[in-house]
Amino acid sequence: MSDFKVLSSQSFIKIGFDANGDKIVPGKPPAMPPDGVQFDRRRHGGLYDRGSADSYYGRAFSPHWYPLGTCNGPKITELTPEERREYAAGYNDNEASGDKKEWD
């Protein structure tokens, strides 16, 4: 979740939020999410989300997740077997649904 604050007609400051919903303060590292959050299927950047997104966009099977949300913070690629299964569930569920990005 993020917000934009208008400074002038041509400049914006992006105000971000960390994994706990707190505003990110410049110079202060964002809070890391609690353990187990990678299994929350509603969370952007979680294992299931990344698997389904990779399938949707026609990307290769490449298990990973982002603890601070999609493309925010470190990309986690060293996974446990359980985490790999969760990513695979997202990937395989999307493959079975046939929901793919149409590149026009």
Image (cartoon, rainbow, N blue to C red):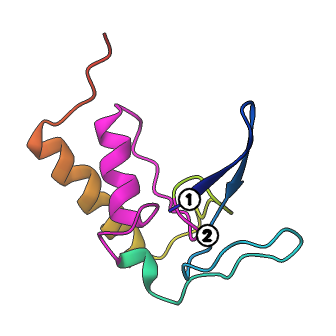
Q: Secondary structure at mark 2?
A: loop
Expressed as whole percent of the image width and height from the top left, the position of residue 52 reads 30, 50
Numbered label attached to residue 2? 1
Q: Residue furthest top?
A: 104
| Residue at the image position 55 percent from the left and 63 percent from the top | 66
Mark 2 surroundings: few (<14), some (14-19) or many (≥20) residues within 10 A: some
Determine whether label 2 and label 1 are within 8 Å by CB. Answer: yes
Mark 1 surroundings: few (<14), some (14-19) or many (≥20) residues within 10 A: few
Q: Residue furthest left?
A: 97
Left or right? Give the position of 60 relative to 95. right
| Residue at the image position 58 percent from the left and 61 percent from the top | 77
Numbered label attached to residue 31? none
In this rendering, is residue 59 above or below 75?
A: above
| Residue at the image position 35 percent from the left and 58 percent from the top | 49
Find out whether residue 28 is within the magenta segment.
no
Expressed as whole percent of the image width and height from the top left, the position of residue 94 reads 19, 47
Find out whether residue 66 is within the magenta segment.
yes
**Real-space CA distance between mark 2 and mark 1, rounded to the nearest whole angstrom:** 6 Å
Expressed as whole percent of the image width and height from the top left, the position of residue 50 reads 40, 54
In this rendering, is residue 70 above or below 67?
A: above
Q: Which residue is mark 2?
A: 17
Q: Which residues are magenta?
A: 40-69
Q: Amino acid at mark 1?
A: Ser
Question: What secondary structure predominates along the stretch shown in magenta?
Answer: loop
Q: Residue furthest front?
A: 8
Q: Amino acid at mark 2?
A: Phe
